[in-house]
Amino acid sequence: MTVIEPGLVPEEAEHQRQSLGTAAARNLASTTKSTPQMQGISPRWLLRKLPWVATQAGTYRVNRRLTYAVGDGRVSFISTGADIRVIPQELRELPLLRDFPDDDVLVALAERFQQREYQPGEALVESGNRADEVFLIAHGKVQKIGRGEYGAQTVLDTMADGEHFGDEVLTGAEAEWEYTARAVTPVIALVLPWQSVQQLNGRTDALRAHVDAVVRGAAKPQNKHGEADIEIASGHDGEPDLPATFVDYELAPREYELEVAQTVLRVHTRVSDLYNHPMNQTEQQLRLTIEALRERQEHEMINNRRIGLLHNADLKQRIHTRSGPPTPDDLDDLISRRRKTRFMLAHPRTIAAFGREASKRGLYPGTTDVEGTRVTTWRGVPLLPTDKIPISKHGTSSIIAMRVGEEDGGVVGLHQPGIPDEVQPSLNARFMGIDEKAIASYLVSAYYSVAVLVPDALGVLEHVEIGRS
């Protein structure tokens, strides 16, 4: 017969403890514990793979050879319902209108652009026809198609929102289109016929004089990169007069000042006094704060409008996908635009989209070991994942490719080691005192920047669709 103690139901009586329970035992034992964990820590490949250059006085100057070639910018638009207009001042992004001073003429030109729409496969211009219109692409994607060396048609270039072609029409010279421009997606373009430019009457005198001056400047001897030419004689015989030359430099080179990411860490003295065993509370708070600062640093080095890689890539080094998703052809185009492409950066979802496109073609990208991690490669170039490259609301992202190092005229990180109270290179934690509430404060600062030494060191594949299956 089972004896049941008063106050216990039979089920509880059957499970009466025969030994000390763990809940009570924990009061007399030390627990084995981990250090504080943080979910927001990423591999931070950019910070790990970028060569770092020590600066002095927080400034780094990038000296380059003088360049005559006029920059080729992108034009911005405003829309009212279905009507799209070009912002007059944005016309200065056209090479022949760069630095044109007369806003009234630009307004008059902007008013004469005509909005046209094209369906996929429709030609905007045909090769061999007279070139007498300026095209601004407000929306959509357009391919330039021409004939290769052996007569076959080939894609010369892919253009998208904000890009343009045909601005040489502004010179007034008679010419023919050397390529066919065909819409890949639905396209909205703003078109300026040459006849509309002539309608400006007397106001074209200043415009014509400006265009002529730009053309004369662009005609100065220069290499294929637009740099002032260095005259050299070769293949000669006898005693000809050798050319005299010099290497000209930019008069106003860009200077990079170090950016800063900062926060104030607060720790109550009661916590740091009484609860420092077995782990130092201040050290753990500082460790996780530094991790967050480094995450922000990498984000800024990619996205900051002043120094970020996505915003500082030369416009001639920004290319578009041929069809939308990232294909092997697109990555080939990206890699081929520079020598010694050391690595590429992309969002993990973008890398997955590239893997799907490669699989469709029966191709299987390679892998390699990078600091103990297996990563995808293409043509031997590591494709490193980073969640700092944004994905737009339309499901598009970018892929960054770069050459790195001062020796190769590449991309370099900038910092200033040796600062006071340094915890890591160019990162310090300075004690700010204890307030009347017994809270100790520490100013934690990280100083950094990133510089592109030669424009072709950095390239970006833009508007990469990652959601299309």
Image (cartoon, rainbow, N blue to C red):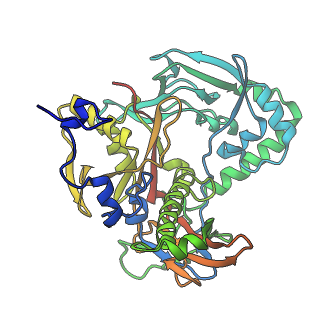
Identify the residue shown where x is 35% and y is 77%.
237
**In this view, 49 is above or below 283:** above
* Residue at (56, 56) in percent of width and height: 300
Quadrant that contains the N terminus? top left
Front position in the image: 273 or 426: 273
- Residue 258: percent from the left, percent from the top? 61, 70
Relative to 220, 391 lies left or right: left
- For the question of whether residue 149 can be seen, the reply is no
- Left or right relative to 123: residue 379: left
Q: Nearer the viewer, residue 92 or 295?
A: 295
Viewer-side residue, 431 vs 271: 271
Q: State the image coordinates of residue 35 (x, y, percent, origin top left).
A: 38, 64
Residue drawn where x is 53% and y is 85% of the image: 418
Please provide percent x and percent y for residue 98. Answer: 71, 48
Q: Is residue 408 left or right of residue 463?
A: left
Which residue appears at 68% of the width and 76% of the height?
434
Instruction: Identify the image quadrant of residue 175.
Output: top right
Q: Quadrant of residue 206?
A: top right
Pick whichever, 438 or 164, lies toward us. 438
